[in-house]
């Protein structure tokens, strides 16, 4: 028996933990860059499941792969071989410049694995009779996930405070402040980890100077450089990984969100020198790297390469940024437009305005979201075209004009009552 939005909302309010502020929409299906609600209304999705559905919805090759593999083998456990893990690891190491892979269920698990390997590497390389170093540096505005190690390296107090004390030994460095980085980086640091293009932190790219300083200091102090590519990786920025825009090779890289076309899968990619510190029994997972998710991930990577979608991401991403900058010239409320490829943020001058703009765009059947309070985030599927961008920009321009007249503020205020 089908249920409507009101019925499912009541059911969830009674039985689910209250962890999400959901949009007032119940989605039923998707096709290409569009999703459809329970009343059949179509929405242009410029969020793609928070950066997950890079091939959009109901992609025929992905759907066929899921159906075929589900008939054969969904799960085996990592006590056995299956035909896809090794093949997927080979592709991921080729495109990343790293040497080995470990598969997880999610991005936060991949990040936890990276922190564990950083500590293990420090212990393995510690001089006899000395205490192994264990300090970890992270960045202001960082977001790495919601498990304890990931929380400890996530900057905003609101995420960490309810669960304190979190993993000890983490220190935050001011964003893009090379002097602060140099003050805090010494021989007690075992790793520095950061997003080369921050996602939840507001679509903020690290500067070339900061990235190079972090790399140099890591080498100087025999610490590891960890790149969080959970949101920015797998072609989102127009290259396979955001760090490749900087000409820097990290020691560890975490991947998740889009890797398996919407199925849960993450990966930790590791250099050969770091891989030597891990041995059977030190780390593991029950579900990570199962045959279904890995088979789909291989097909997704093949599609991205075969159809040269990274070039498409670069082209349409540049067009999106250009169009947003045109709007910026017309509307003083837009403080900044920043990003790479199809990972773009538009910073507005107040949280209330950002909430109102997002609400109005949803009412106009365009899905975006707000991050870091004031930033409207664009993470569309890679299949998006200029035509879709034009539709979104026309609607966004109309919403911002309403804001200039005070109409959006009134609408938002009415919604809160």
Image (spheres, rainbow, N blue to C red):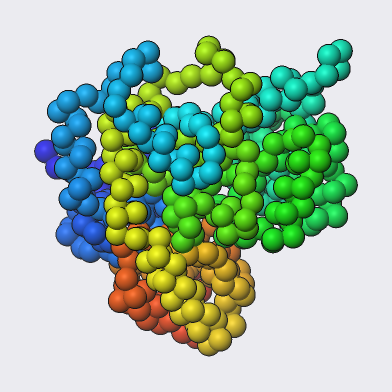
Residue 246 lies in quadrant: bottom right
Name which residue lies at 56% across and 34% down.
270
Give whichever of 200, 183 is nearer the camera: 183
Residue sitting farthest toward the left: 1
Counting from the top left corner in percent of width and height, residue 31 is at 21, 57
Q: Is residue 187 left or right of residue 294?
A: right
Q: Is residue 209 above or below residue 93?
A: below
Q: Is residue 203 above or below residue 169?
A: below
Name which residue lies at 46% across and 47% down.
95
Q: Is residue 130 left or right of residue 349?
A: right
Q: Is residue 205 left or right of residue 218?
A: left
Counting from the top left corner in percent of width and height, residue 115 is at 63, 30
**Count of picture labels:** 0
Give whichever of 207, 350 is nearer the camera: 207
Give whichever of 160, 63 is nearer the camera: 63
Residue 14 visible to the viewer:
no
Counting from the top left corner in percent of width and height, residue 360 is at 40, 70
Q: Is residue 380 above or below residue 53?
A: below
Q: Quadrant of the N terminus?
A: top left
Counting from the top left corner in percent of width and height, residue 172 is at 75, 44
Residue 383 visible to the viewer:
yes
Give whichever of 385, 372 is nearer the camera: 385
Name which residue lies at 69% across and 61% down.
207
Name which residue lies at 46% across and 43% down.
94
Q: Is residue 170 above or below residue 238?
A: above
């Amino acid at each position: 028996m089908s249920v409507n939005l009101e019925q499912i909302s009541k059911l969830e309010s009674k039985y689910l933990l209250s962890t999400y502020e959901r949009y007032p929409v119940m989605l039923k299906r998707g096709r290409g860059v569009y999703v459809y609600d329970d009343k059949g209304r179509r929405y242009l999705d410029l969020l793609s499941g928070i950066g997950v559905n890079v091939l959009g919805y109901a992609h025929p090759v992905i759907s066929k792969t899921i159906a075929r593999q589900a008939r054969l083998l969904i799960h085996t456990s990592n006590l056995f071989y299956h035909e896809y893990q090794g093949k997927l690891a080979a592709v991921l190491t080729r495109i990343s410049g790293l040497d080995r892979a470990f598969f997880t269920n999610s991005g936060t698990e991949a990040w936890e694995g990276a922190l564990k390997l950083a500590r293990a590497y420090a212990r393995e390389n510690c001089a006899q009779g000395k205490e192994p170093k264990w300090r970890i540096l992270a960045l202001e505005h960082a977001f790495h996930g919601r498990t304890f190690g990931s929380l400890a390296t996530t900057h905003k107090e609101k995420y960490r405070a309810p669960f304190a004390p979190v993993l000890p030994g983490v220190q935050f460095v001011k964003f893009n402040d090379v002097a602060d980085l140099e003050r805090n980086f010494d021989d007690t640091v075992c790793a520095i980890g950061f997003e080369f293009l921050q996602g939840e932190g507001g679509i903020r790219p690290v500067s070339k100077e900061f990235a190079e300083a972090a790399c140099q200091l890591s080498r100087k102090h025999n610490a590891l450089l960890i790149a969080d590519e959970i949101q920015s990786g797998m072609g989102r920025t127009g290259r396979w990984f955001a760090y490749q825009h900087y000409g820097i090779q990290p020691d560890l890289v975490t991947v998740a969100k889009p890797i398996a076309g919407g199925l849960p899968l993450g990966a930790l990619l590791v250099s050969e020198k770091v891989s030597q510190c891990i041995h059977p029994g030190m780390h593991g997972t029950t579900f990570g790297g199962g045959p279904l998710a890995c088979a789909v991930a291989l097909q997704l990577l093949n599609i991205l390469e075969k159809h040269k979608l990274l070039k498409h991401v670069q082209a349409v991403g540049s067009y999106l940024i250009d169009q947003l900058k045109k709007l910026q010239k017309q509307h003083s409320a837009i403080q900044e437009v920043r990003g790479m490829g199809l990972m773009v943020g538009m910073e507005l001058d107040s949280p209330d305005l950002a909430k109102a703009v997002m609400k109005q765009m949803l009412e106009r059947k365009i899905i975006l979201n707000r991050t870091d309070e004031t930033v409207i985030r664009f993470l569309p599927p890679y299949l998006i075209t200029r035509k879709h961008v034009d539709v979104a920009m026309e609607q966004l321009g109309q919403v911002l004009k309403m804001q200039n007249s005070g109409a959006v503020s009134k609408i938002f205020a009415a919604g809160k009552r």
